[in-house]
């Protein structure tokens, strides 16, 4: 049981806000206030609103674009992936404080207002383009406070199943369902650098240049070391030539063929002697040039003999790195974390919920889900104490965001009397302290 007197912590929002911890609770999404503080530290949604074209022609707009964008992103972060949820969220005290401005003393945007905002205003070509760029702009703002020494880019595709007459949906034989086939680029911190919605029947690497080129352009002349990892779908000479021209180190899985296997024939013979109980692993490195390549390139092979298996498991990687073969394989294997991040996006943010009829509206929804994912990942990587460093985005949503609170309104401020259950008072204080350290120092007078 927490101290019944509670403890007050101030957050610098538009109005004075005090957070108190009590033992008796009511349910709410009060933990969103911590994310709102993090978002305010970097000015993320304000940056987005500055780049969006306001398509509204009336003069009685109730909410600014920044507030509408904030409601879209924070709603998804809290697990409300449908616009229909706005009819309840617009009256939620925590969401009203997140949106700010008129919503503080009134209500946030309704379902009809959010529907027009997402499916009509944001789906315009210029706004959809600005929304796609916003992911990288948010990451750049974070990196300005904590500049990375290097950037590792992982590109991968995924499926978003569809269940109706949705424009662009098609059957994909690889995934075995009717779906969209979005493309993602992550960095080593788990942030989505860029994503693009594609029809369900396109190749996994379709449109890779348009997605990757804009990410590389942002880091050009900013970071000294830039790396790329991709699976066999991205093994094509155009990709190699682009990465080499940009001076990017890469490791890309190469589909096996008879020529490659002939180069490591001595490793494909079963080792002499009684098979051990552990895996026998061998590496090889050689120069190889396919007919479609303009020059020879280094290929690294890994051969695993597993106990009880008749044939070895063989993998090839094409690379321009000069590291030992074992280190090249270890570096490539780390791209498996991108698949984990995609699963987190599906489970915690529900970014497969693309239920609009038009392709443009679903592309907007994907970008909004990705923005919510990045905001959640910023919290996890920048502002979580050591006791919670291993929490997934799902755990953060259930433990940090879903904090019940009793809201007490006063004449000049509002008090959120928050529950001390999964996130104790001391941990919440540490989170706010870590967020405060991320604020830019005041400009010299």
Image: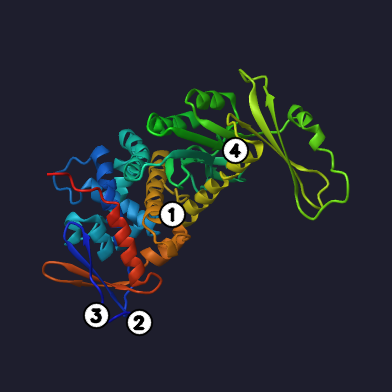
Query: Of circles 3 and 4, which is in front?
Result: 3
Instruction: Indicate whether 165 appears above or below 98.
Output: above
Which sits earlier in the primary sequence, circle 4 or circle 1?
4
Question: Is disc 2 placed on a helix, strand or loop?
Answer: loop
Q: Which quarter shows the N terminus? A: bottom left
| Marking on residue 1 | 2
Which sits earlier in the primary sequence, circle 3 or circle 1?
3
Q: Give the quarter of the image for residue 431.
A: bottom left
Q: Along the line of sight, which residue is nearer the eye, 57 or 281?
A: 281
Q: Along the line of sight, which residue is nearer the eye, 9 or 64?
A: 9
Q: Give the quarter of the image for residue 74.
A: bottom left
| Marking on residue 349 | 1
Q: Are marks 2 and 1 in contact (CB under 8 Å)?
A: no
Residue at mark 4: 231
Structural distance between the alpha carbons of marks 4 and 2: 51 Å
Residue at mark 3: 5
Q: Give the quarter of the image for residue 26.
A: bottom left
- Dot 3, how many residues are within 10 Å of its Cα: few (below 14), some (14-19), or many (20+)? few
Compared across the picture, whether 300 is left or right of 24 comes to right
Q: Are marks 4 and 2 in contact (CB under 8 Å)?
A: no
Residue at 32 percent across and 79 percent down: it is 2
Question: Is disc 1 placed on a helix, strand or loop?
Answer: helix
Structural distance between the alpha carbons of marks 4 and 1: 25 Å
Question: Is disc 4 placed on a helix, strand or loop?
Answer: loop
């Amino acid at each position: 049981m927490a101290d019944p007197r509670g403890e007050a912590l101030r957050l610098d929002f538009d109005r004075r806000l005090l957070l108190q911890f009590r033992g008796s609770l009511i349910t709410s999404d009060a933990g969103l206030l911590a994310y709102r503080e993090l978002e305010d530290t970097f000015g993320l949604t304000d940056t987005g609103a500055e780049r969006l074209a306001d398509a509204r022609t009336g003069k009685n707009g109730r909410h600014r674009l920044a507030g509408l964008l904030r409601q879209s992103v924070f709603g998804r972060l809290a697990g409300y992936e449908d616009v229909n949820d706005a009819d309840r969220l617009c009256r939620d005290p925590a969401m009203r404080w997140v949106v700010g401005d008129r919503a503080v003393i009134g209500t946030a945007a309704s379902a009809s207002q959010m529907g027009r905002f997402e499916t009509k205003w944001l789906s315009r070509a210029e706004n959809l383009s600005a929304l796609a760029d916003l992911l990288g702009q948010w990451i750049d703002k974070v990196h300005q406070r904590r500049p990375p020494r290097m950037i590792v880019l992982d590109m991968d595709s995924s499926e978003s199943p569809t269940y109706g007459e949705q424009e662009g949906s098609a059957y994909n034989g690889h995934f075995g369902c009717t779906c969209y086939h979005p493309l993602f680029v992550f960095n080593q911190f788990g942030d989505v650098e860029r994503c693009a919605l594609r029809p369900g029947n396109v190749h996994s690497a379709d449109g890779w240049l348009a997605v990757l080129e804009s990410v590389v352009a942002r880091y050009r002349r900013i970071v000294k070391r830039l790396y790329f990892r991709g699976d066999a779908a991205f093994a094509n000479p155009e990709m190699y030539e682009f990465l080499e021209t940009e001076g990017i180190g890469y490791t890309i899985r190469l589909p096996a063929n008879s020529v490659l296997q002939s180069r490591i024939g001595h490793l494909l013979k079963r080792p002499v002697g009684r098979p051990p109980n552990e895996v026998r692993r061998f590496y090889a490195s050689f120069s190889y040039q396919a007919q479609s390549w303009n020059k020879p390139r280094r290929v690294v092979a890994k051969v695993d003999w597993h106990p009880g298996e008749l044939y070895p498991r063989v993998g090839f990687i094409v690379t321009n790195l000069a590291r030992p073969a074992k280190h090249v394989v270890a570096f490539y294997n780390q791209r498996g974390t991108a698949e984990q991040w995609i699963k987190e996006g599906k489970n915690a943010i529900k970014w497969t919920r693309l239920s609009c009829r038009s392709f443009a509206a679903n592309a907007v929804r994907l970008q909004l889900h990705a923005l919510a994912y990045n905001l959640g990942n910023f919290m996890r990587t920048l502002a979580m104490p050591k006791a919670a460093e291993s929490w997934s985005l799902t755990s953060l949503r259930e433990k940090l965001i879903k904090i019940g609170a009793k809201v007490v309104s006063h004449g000049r401020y509002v008090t959120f009397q928050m529950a001390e259950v999964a996130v104790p008072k001391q941990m919440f204080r540490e989170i706010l302290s870590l967020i405060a350290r991320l604020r830019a120092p005041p400009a010299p007078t």
